[in-house]
Amino acid sequence: MRNLLVLSIMACFCLSCSAQDITLPPAQKTGGKPLLDALNERQSTREFSDKDLDNQTLSDLLWAAYGFNREDKRTAPSANNKQPFSVYAVLKSGVYLYDAKANTLVLKAQGDFRTATGSQDFVAVAPLNLVYVADLTKNSAEAAAVDVGFISQNVYLYCASADLATVVRGWFNKDDLKKALKLGENEAPILTQTVGHKK
Ligand SMILES: Cc1cc2nc3c(=O)[nH]c(=O)nc-3n(C[C@H](O)[C@H](O)[C@H](O)COP(=O)(O)O)c2cc1C
């Protein structure tokens, strides 16, 4: 009886831990606007509604950004296929690491850290700020700077296709961001990108 009680408490504890990660629905990998329409509509927008993005949109957006479209290769090319990037999603509820294989947002820190991703006013209004973090032990900063252009353009094109607003941002405080994301010495935030519904 006592063992059963201990087991139930442990099960509850584990459930409450994993409940904080966000398991995303499978990404929709077909459809959307024709590519030429998306290119024609791609643009930076700095006005956002504060309405949350639903989990299907998060899944589709993150897959478009940096998901796998082959066994071990992704929607974005990578110099020497080093794939040095991790994509973090900073939501109202916390900082999450996108695990593309598990299609899960893994909670790294609970709480609203959106303002740590930049000081432009819309950053605190928009529901999502993406942070592209390079592991500089995998490739040089120069190579990472090229890779990240593809990832952010994927997000621009997805947003144009899904009628969402986005802007890529290089203006942020690296130290604030490293602290909020609990990054290691060799992990460098290279770019951020705000995403949300249009205002
Ligand atoms: C590397 C890079 C960094 C940028 N940083 C910022 C930024 O910190 N804040 C911002 O509002 N826009 C930023 N932008 C967006 C540019 O201002 C924008 O792309 C440019 O004005 C052209 O507008 P468009 O994207 O609508 O074509 C950045 C763009 C790039 C490529």
Image (spheres, grey):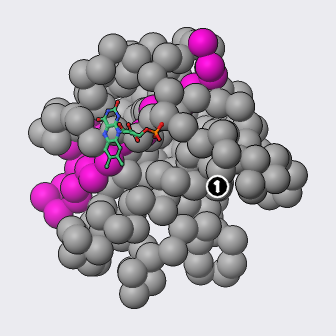
Location of residue 64 in the rendering, given as x and y in whole percent from the top left corner = 64, 55
Q: Which residue is mark 1?
A: 64
Please state, as top left, top right, bottom left or bottom right, where the C terminus lies in the image: top right
Q: Is residue 197 left or right of residue 136?
A: right
Determine if the C-beta at disc 1 is less than 8 A from ligand 1.
no
In the rendered image, the residue lying farthest to the bottom is 80
Location of the N terminus by quadrant is top right
Q: What residue appears at the point 81 percent right and 53 percent down from the top-left corner?
A: 34
Q: Determine whether 67 is above or below 34 in the image.
A: below
| Residue closest to the eye, 90 or 161 | 161
Q: Quadrant of residue 185?
A: bottom left
Q: Position of residue 11 (x, y in %)?
A: 61, 39
Q: Residue at x 74, y 54 (%)?
A: 36
Give ligand 1's quarter of the image: top left
Q: Which amino acid is tagged 1?
A: Ala
The part of the chain drawn in magenta is 178-199
